[in-house]
Image (tube, helix red, strand yellow):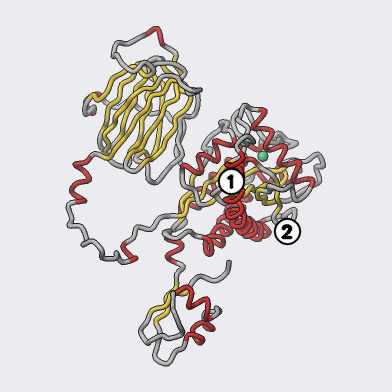
Amino acid sequence: MLKGLSVMKAPLPDLRRRLLLKGLAGLGLGVAPLSAWAGAGVQRLRMSVDGQTTRLVFDMEGPADYEIFTLESPDRVVVDLSGAQALGPLDVVSNPRSLVQGVRHAQRNGTDLRVVLDLRAASEPHSFVLLPAQGSPHRLVLDLTERPNVVSAARAAPEPPRNSAAPRSSEPLRDVIVAIDPGHGGHDPGALGPNGTREKDVVLDIARRLAARIEQEPGMRPVLIRTGDYFLPLRERINRARAAQADVFLSIHADAIHDRSVQGSSVYILSERGASSEAARFLAQRENSADLRLGGVPIESKDDSLTSVLLDLAQSGSLEASHSLASRLISEMHRVGKVRKPEVERANFAVLRSPDVPSVLIEAAFISNPSEERKLRTASFQNSLSDAILTGLRAYFATHAPPGTMIAEGRRDRHVIRPGESLSVIAERYSMSVAELRAVNQLPNDRIFAGQVLEIPPRGG
Ligand SMILES: [Zn+2]
């Protein structure tokens, strides 16, 4: 969860370690200030991670004079852009592998923009600029790599001999990552309640409460796709989830319909072959159209048939997982309020169209119904809905956590064979078949011995 906008104090000059880089973003060289360029806007900030390097790209309206320096305790990189201003939130999606754990920015002296990158470790910045090309604007590119003298001490330990299999317990296990996407935002308010409640506001509140709960959950980590009141195209929401290496994607909305008596929550998954109901089709049209209306890029490129075939294949796998996730969420949401339909609905939501991340769209109650509109604003409903979603996530990950995650490893059960036990007795004890038990443990036959350890897979599916 990274903050987009926050006011910050300018660091004291004596804390400045060294002046590392100066340049003219957009022109590539020169250090002379060019006041004529005053007013260059930073459109957005993008972050990607490649191995040890974290790359930040500032998309700029035009060139700007810039300075980069580092600060210690805590480690930060400061980028000062003269005659520049932020045109967007300038936040990035948190990524556990990134050296950057937070971004703040503020205007200085009325004319300059200061961007502060909060780092996980002392880093060496390298920068360069790119001129507009192939539809891309002026860009300032900043590459960060962990400063080697800090790492070397930790790496001085003797390496384990080659060819020796590392014990499983020494493998670093990761958290499962839950991307939470509050729908709409900025100039797209979403649906409006009869008393003026805006969908974009209540879904952000719910998303924040859910993120706070996931933050406390062992083995899970939240990533908020939208952290404030600004607009994001649907494709960008998917991209952010994928950049964060999300294991699941939850898009949170509130429903609306002309008939003000309609109530209840629903959970949708993507359907490539038509909607599960007329209402689902209508809803998908409405949620998708916001994107087209508001300057997003259409998500499909029909001319690329190979891509769409591959997408189809990959999606059928994640659709199954999406369905499991959705049905677990629905059964939990039953407990906190009306559920409009007991089964998972399918509709062609562009925001769910992520080929490799199981994705669901939650319509949390009807904002068009006066009593549900009131309820949507209350902390108690937002809390109990978040609790229900978290419980649904727990149930989903109990059977779907990817290998290498703390949850997947924690659920693994082991059975030490006692004298006299047979495979069929053990299989029965764990409600599984002998064939399954053999397959999991790669046993060529039914022969086992006392003291042997068998892995017992989690139940359910
Ligand atoms: Zn919506």
The front one of 11 and 167 is: 167
Is 288 on the left or on the right of 227, as rendered?
A: right
Looking at the image, can residue 263 be seen?
Answer: yes
Question: Distance from label 2 to label 1 (Cα)?
Answer: 29 Å
Q: Which mark identifies residue 342?
A: 2
- Look at the numbered disc 1 and give the secondary structure of its residue: helix
User: Looking at the image, which residue sits at the far bottom?
Assistant: 420
Q: Which mark identifies residue 279?
A: none
The residue under the point 79% across, 46% down is 278
Q: Which residue is mark 1?
A: 311
The residue under the point 44% across, 75% down is 441
Say how many tags the image has. 2
The amino acid on which the numbered mark 2 sits, given as a three-letter code, is Pro
The residue under the point 29% across, 41% down is 121
Dot placed on the residue nearer the N-terminal end, 2 or 1: 1
The residue under the point 26% across, 65% down is 164
- What x and y, as percent, mark residue 358? 57, 51
The amino acid on which the numbered mark 1 sits, given as a three-letter code, is Leu
Rendering quarter of residue 403: bottom left
Q: Is residue 35 above or below residue 75?
A: above
**Quadrant showing the C terminus:** bottom right
